[in-house]
Structure formats: C-alpha cells, structure tokens
C-alpha cells in the first residue's frame, strides 16, 4: 500500500511500530552502557572521564522515557482512529 492511500490510523500504527523499535534499542543501549559503566567506574573516575559518561547515560535514559511517553500517547490515539468493525 502506498503512503498516499494509507489512512491516518495506518500512519499512526506505522509510527507507533517505529517508536517501539527505537524504544527497544534505547533500552538495550542503556543496559549496555550501564554494564560498561559498572565495570569501569573506578578507572573512568581516575581518568576524569566519569562525568561525560554519566551525562550520556542520563540522556539515553531520558530518551527512553520520552519514547515511552510518546508510545503511550499514540496508543491512545490509535484507539480513537480505529475504524469501526464491519458488519456481516
């Protein structure tokens, strides 16, 4: 189906699917970065590089939270855009 013939419901579902995929990768990034941080926390502090890594972890976590918020909003919108069931 081309983008010209998609309904608003289909467009929102496409965006929702993409955001859920982004959330999945964001979560994995946070977990990976946290694991690395825990392994090298002491060394990074000695090298005076702990601050930038903490900032990255915070920003990645904020992105994950923002994705969750937008996904919830779009899920509510999908309910309102869903076409009524066809009668038999």
Image: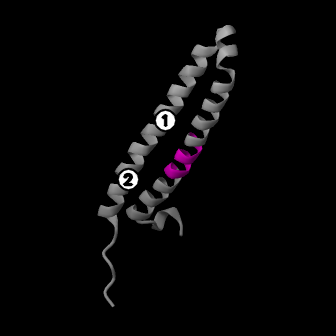
Mark 2 or 1, closer to the camera: 1
State how the image is colored: one colour
Magenta residues (range): 19-26
Which mark is drawn over residue 63?
1
Spatial CA distance of label 2 from label 1 is 16 Å
**Residue 29 to residue 72: above or below:** above
Where residue 33 appears, x then y in whole percent?
A: 63, 31
Q: Is residue 3 left or right of residue 29?
A: left
The residue carrying mark 2 is: 74
Mark 1 lies on a secondary structure that is helix
Magenta: predominant secondary structure element?
helix
Where residue 86 appears, x then y in whole percent?
A: 33, 83
In percent of the image, x 60 and y 42: which residue is there?
Answer: 28
Q: Front-most of 4 and 83?
A: 83
Label 2 environment density (alpha carbons within 10 Å; few <14, some 14–19, many ≥20): some
**Residue 50 to residue 74: above or below:** above
């Amino acid at each position: 189906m081309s983008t010209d013939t998609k309904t608003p419901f289909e467009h929102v579902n496409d965006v929702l699917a993409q955001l859920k995929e982004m959330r999945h990768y964001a979560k994995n990034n946070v977990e990976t970065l946290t694991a690395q941080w825990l392994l090298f926390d002491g060394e990074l502090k000695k090298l005076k590089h702990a601050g930038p890594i903490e900032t990255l972890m915070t920003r990645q976590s904020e992105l994950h939270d923002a994705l969750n918020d937008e996904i919830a909003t779009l899920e509510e919108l999908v309910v309102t855009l869903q076409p009524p069931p066809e009668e038999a």
